[in-house]
Amino acid sequence: MDKQIRHEATSTDIAAAERVLGIEQTAPERALIAHAIAAQIDLARTRRAVTLDDDLAPACVFEPRLPGFDMPDPGPLILPRPTLPFPGADDEAIAFAPASSQAAWIRAGELSAVRLTGICLERIARLDPTLGAFARLSPSALDEAAALDRRAARGDWAGPLHGVPWACKDLIDTAGIVTDWGAEPFRDRLPPGDAVVVRRLRAAGAVLLGKTVVGALGYGDVWHGGRTRNPWNPDEGASGSSSGSAAAVAAGLCGFALGTETLGSIVAPAARCGAVGLRPSFGRIARTGVMPLCPSLDRIGPLCRDIADTALVLAALNGADPGDPS
């Protein structure tokens, strides 16, 4: 019987590799890298245990429709009636309300986009030094909100998310705002334009607050600026890699946020932080302008405080794009 060879990674192995690469890590960094490599080795062993035929091709594009079937037109999205009465001067109650209620209060004239955006920015300034949910803020958030209030005064409504502040995972490109994928080598990366999902949310009237922390290159909750914390237990990480988006939503720092998922990066931080995460079917939302991790698995989805809000955001994002063949 052939002897099975087990390959394990230790901090000593990492230190030896550093000499080859001409770099030097700290002891905690070596332990973190060794732990991550061990997890990948275990995953590879599990995959090797599954027998696949040599002629089995990967399913890069999923087309669920049978020949001759046309998808029905869902019609316009109807904004749900607010389930909560307007809380008036209670900023915290406004911050933690569902995005659908926030949007309905704006449409009813009880709340302005500027006030709601200001509430979120104040909470970010006060709470984020502990949570570490945001990588950077948009300098034009209040200006966008003011422009939407002027449109509302004219009766010109952008859509069901008009005036609702949102946060964008830092794997998703935003014009004029650094998108560094949570990784030190890309910390000055300025994308050439907005991702498709960002353009669609702008068209729906949502106000971009800023970029939320992503675990480096879409893995975990540690990035080059530190670690994102669970709002309900800051002693533990928020999980990842949509760590900042889940923490920001759970802490009432935004109306909703976008995350991405390859292998649990929406649902894991949502579960850890007590948010609602929707992982849509593959190909449901165009990924043009988003850092690819595994093109046959990657998807984009909303993180919210209320289940109904995920439908509201999904309706704004839904649809194909020529830049994404999935």
Image (cartoon, rainbow, N blue to C red):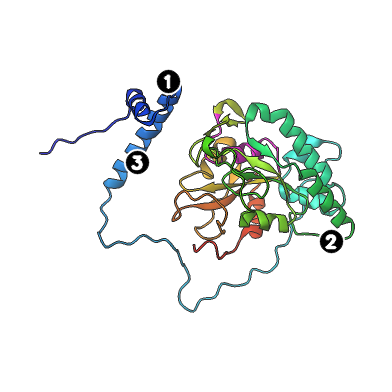
Q: Can you identify the residue that label 1 sits on?
A: 27
Q: Quadrant of the N terminus?
A: top left
| Spatial CA span between label 2 and label 3 | 52 Å
Which residue type carries mark 1? Answer: Ala
Residue, disc 3:
43
Residue 179 is marked as none
* Residue type beneath disc 3: Leu
Position in image of residue 45 (x %, y %): 29, 41
Chain-order first, disc 1 or disc 2: 1
Badge 2 marks a residue whose secondary structure is loop
Helix, strand or loop at disc 3? helix
288 vs 241, nearest the viewer = 288
Residues in magenta, as a range: 237-254
Which amino acid lies under the numbered mark 2 shown in the image of this protein? Asp
In the drawing, what numbered circle is on residue 156? 2
Quarter-wise, where is residue 285 in the image? bottom right
Most extreme residue toward the bottom, as rendered?
68
Residue 85, x across and y down, in percent: 81, 45
Cα gap from disc 1 to disc 2, whole angstroms: 58 Å
